[in-house]
Image (cartoon, rainbow, N blue to C red):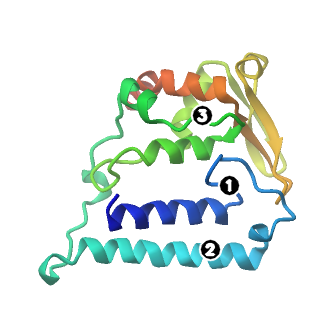
Amino acid sequence: MDRSEKIKKAKEYIEQLANGINPLDGMEIPENEVVNNVKISRCLFFVSGLLEESINCEKTKNYGEKEQKINPSQKRRFYISQEELCASFDFSEREISGSEIVNRINSLIDTDIMQKLKLKTINNWLLNMGLLEEEETERGKRKKPTEAGKELGIVQKQSFYSGYLFTAYGRDAQHFIVDNIEAIISADNAG
């Protein structure tokens, strides 16, 4: 692993810690842990920003020339084959959030030239498959698992940190998403 890759990995870990997620297993860190203190979390986000600047500096070191960033609209659409994803995805034995699944998938692509996968893409597909449904709350619409989704291993959990309910995915549900990534991408591209 070269210096640039190490910095990217460190940034990923720090962002996960700042969001109250253990980067080693994808589980939420208990609310009473020091990393969930608002001041510590803000500090971690700040350090993540510094690492992002470092990554950008590494890219622009080529003889002092500024890197020409690719306009997001010029990036290729997200794509990863099901075989590549199955071989590389870091499945968790514990339930992890949809955001964590998306982060793990996006860590396997070159986001400098390819658009990132969005959680909305997976959620829309799961809604169409009847595994998630939307419910109205005072904060707006929230996704939750249907009975079929629960049978697959999709659950609703409460954040220790904020008390907010979120959808989490057990190992079987993670496999289901990974095994159907090409259908998810295809449905998004058709939409």
Image position of 121 with respect to 132: above or below: below
Rendering coords of residue 108 (x, y %): 40, 44
Q: Which mark lies nearer to you, 1 or 2?
A: 1
Image position of 44 with respect to 163: above or below: below
Rendered residue at 65%/46% (across/down): 25
Q: CA distance from mark 3 to mark 1?
A: 23 Å
Considering the image in quadrants, where does the C terminus appear? top left
The local crowd at label 1, few if under 14, some if 14 to 19, many if 20 or more residues have their Cα within 10 Å, is some
- Horizontal side of 64 relative to 101 (left or right) equals left
Rendered residue at 44%/25% (across/down): 187
Considering the image in quadrants, where does the N terminus appear? bottom left
7, 146: nearer the viewer: 7
Label 3 belongs to which residue? Answer: 123
Rendering coords of residue 130 (x, y %): 66, 19
Badge 1 marks a residue whose secondary structure is loop
Q: Residue 186's quadrant in the figure?
A: top left
Q: Which mark is residue 184?
A: none
Label 1 belongs to which residue? Answer: 22
Three-letter code, disc 1: Asn
Label 2 belongs to which residue? Answer: 44
**Tags 3 and 1 in contact by the CB under 8 Å rule?**
no
Residue 122 in view (yes/no): yes
Badge 3 marks a residue whose secondary structure is helix
Three-letter code, disc 3: Asn
Q: In the rendered structure, which disc, 1 or 2, sits on the residue that comes first in sequence?
A: 1
Badge 2 marks a residue whose secondary structure is helix
